[in-house]
Amino acid sequence: MSDASSEPGDPPPFLLGLTLAGSVSAGAYLAGVVDFLVRALEAHAAANPDRPVVLKVLSGTSGGGTSASLLVASLLDGIGGGEGAKTLAYVDPDGEARSCGIGLGRLHRLWVEELDLAGDAARTGMLDVEDLEAACAAGRPIPSLLSGLAIDRAADRALGGARWRRGRPYPFLARPLDLFVTTTNLQGVVYGVQFAAGARHAMSRHGMARHFSVEGLGAHPVGSAWLDAYLDAGVRIETPAPGEPVDLRAREAVGAATAWTELRESAVASGAFPVGFPARFVPTRMGEHALLDPAKPGEGGAWPLEAARFREGTDPAATRPNVMPAPDWGAADPAPDGDATYVAIDGGVINNEPFEYARYTLRRAREGAAREGVDWLAPNPRDAKTADRAVIMVDAFPEGGVFGAVSPGNEDDVAAAGLPGVIGGMFAALLAQARFKPAELVAAYDAAVKSRFMIAPSRDPLGDEAPVYSSSLLACGAMGGFSGFLDRRFREHDFILGQRNCQRFLARHFTLHPENPFFAAAGPWSGAEGEERPIVELTGPLAEPIAPPALPKMTLAELEALGPGILGRADGLARTALASAAPGWLVRIGLRAWWRLAGRDQAGALVLRRLEAALVEHGLMELALEPELRRALARADQAPPPGATLTTPARRKVLGLLILAGARPLTLAEIGKGLARARRRIGDPDALPARTLADAPTDDATAMRELLDLLAACPQDHPYRVEATAAPDGTPAWRLARLAGPGVLARVATLIGRAVG
């Protein structure tokens, strides 16, 4: 099959690939982007049959892999059909009531409604201990810090009752629709490189991209020269007869493995964030990693390289010279259906942006080139007048690292060069290097290229500044992307922001020159001379501007309500660790006593303080400070200290440092050092958005004193009132009054009470 329409007389489509990057709880943002994009593509297909825009390939990793897979399941209902006929109400930053549509109900339900840390009577939360109880009873090790059962049951609820309700293919989807879901294979697939004189070198591949080929959802026949050359047909997924159900439960519940259950397994495994969520077993076949039977197309195995598996010009049914490395299956008998099950964790560990799979799927064969070696695939046209295909990457965390020069005179750098620092830095460096893609970096360097685009959390420019693209704009962006699991409002915010960003991207950035052949059958362009024309033109309700959502905030009481669940999960982790380690009875008694008397409460308090500090620094905590202070100072006939405010990020960082310190008071020097470290991690303050550390100099002791004086003016019962004290050497220091802790006698009495109890 060619890479364009195979029906004579049909207008050539603009081919589209969609890559969804890793996201953790910011999958809610990806879901909002995808929801609006699919609705826009459907409306465009209905209004402009002479200008087809066809989605050919999806690729995703981590939360993006989950979202890409859920998109396929959601489309079974029809856009806006089944569970999808909803409207999400919200308020904008000015307090105005707003709403936005939801077209993909299952995608929205999983990311916005289901994935909670605490859970409720109807939902298993991630702090549930049922998985730990099972592991403890069986003497197995801790599966993960958070409950994997919560993920499984959320998937069951979000995917339950799926059926092919629409019953007819979508005109904006390709036939077949290719889907690549990445995971990290902890065992790896071994490849041997043969050298002269029988010498052999072996390497292991750990980054997996499982290929599914979906038939029946799309109407537009589109092939892939790259996949054809590798004879990679993918794991075939068929839609059932119209109205018939699709069972997306786990294979244990279904009673057998189906392509749909395999899709579910890969989607869950792709998001198995290491340590946080449990690793998963992914049952695959040897034929998904290599073509083992030349007479039978493979179910995977295409590499994003221009080397073809087999030389050209021989009978497909005959054995042909292999020009690609073949896996070494060891003592196992290689067969297409041979068992190649592996333990999988988050695909983002190796490949957090599987852009290359989408790009290669879209590439056409170069005319007259042999399918071996290099340069047999043509590059995708990049000019605004000639581009006819593009990949859109949706990335909730576009920032990456920042450069920072190190110095032997900096105590933090000296510590980083010590053994503990080297061990921690080594793993971070290996992870970053595994994700580094020089070929993609070079190809994306030219901003005028019209074959690749990105949608990321963005905010319109304020005044003369440039537009801001940053995960700091997400409510799910704190705590490394885990903050969204704390509160549904955070996930709703990011879902709406995703829709808004996608709407503006389609209108302002997803454009071509009006002379591009894609617009040959279109009506006249009303834009200004030299202005590019949108590929997908928004009309009707889709063109009505989506207002930004107001940033939600948790209260301290809401955060502290998570305390019992955190302590319960901590208890379960401690019990499971002791059961699996099986220490001697005396050690076990001692550890249990320490945990009950001190360790449990210390661990719970530390977790809550870290959560609170992260939310405060990200602007997600309701501080209730400035109104309280204005009232308090008015009663005392005082004016606020000049220049002191609690809305700037650096001052929120100061508050975060005080929260993390707990009962230990901090001096001005320690606070200044904490600010300096934070600024060093995030790079140039002048280049950062307003909700990052971009204000006062780190050595501005006057500004810090003004802030501390302002916090000291809080009412006695305010949770963020600061009290002045002294460090052990007599230096003035400050701490939060509510974290000062009880005296020694009170602590001893508490411990005695627990021991007796």
Image (cartoon, rainbow, N blue to C red):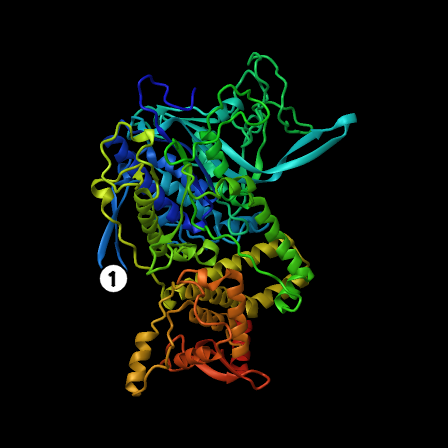
Residue 423's place in the image compared with 5, above or below, is below
Q: Is residue 54 visible?
A: yes
Q: Nearer the viewer, residue 32 or 343?
A: 32
In the rendered structure, the answer to whether residue 411 lies left or right of residue 50 reads: right
Residue 659's place in the image compared with 742, above or below, is above
Work out which quarter of the rendered image holds the N terminus and state it: top left
Q: Give how far across and how far down residue 517 sits, in percent.
A: 33, 29
Q: Residue at x 31, y 47 (%)?
A: 504
In the rendered structure, the answer to whether residue 583 lies left or right of residue 56 reads: right
Mark 1 falls on what kind of element? loop
Q: Is residue 109 visible?
A: no
In the rendered structure, the answer to whether residue 557 lies left or right of residue 24 reads: left
Task: Kindly identify which residue carries mark 1.
Answer: 94
Q: Give how far across and how far down residue 703 sits, in percent.
A: 44, 78
Q: Give how far across and how far down residue 358 sits, in percent.
A: 46, 34
Q: Amino acid at mark 1?
A: Asp
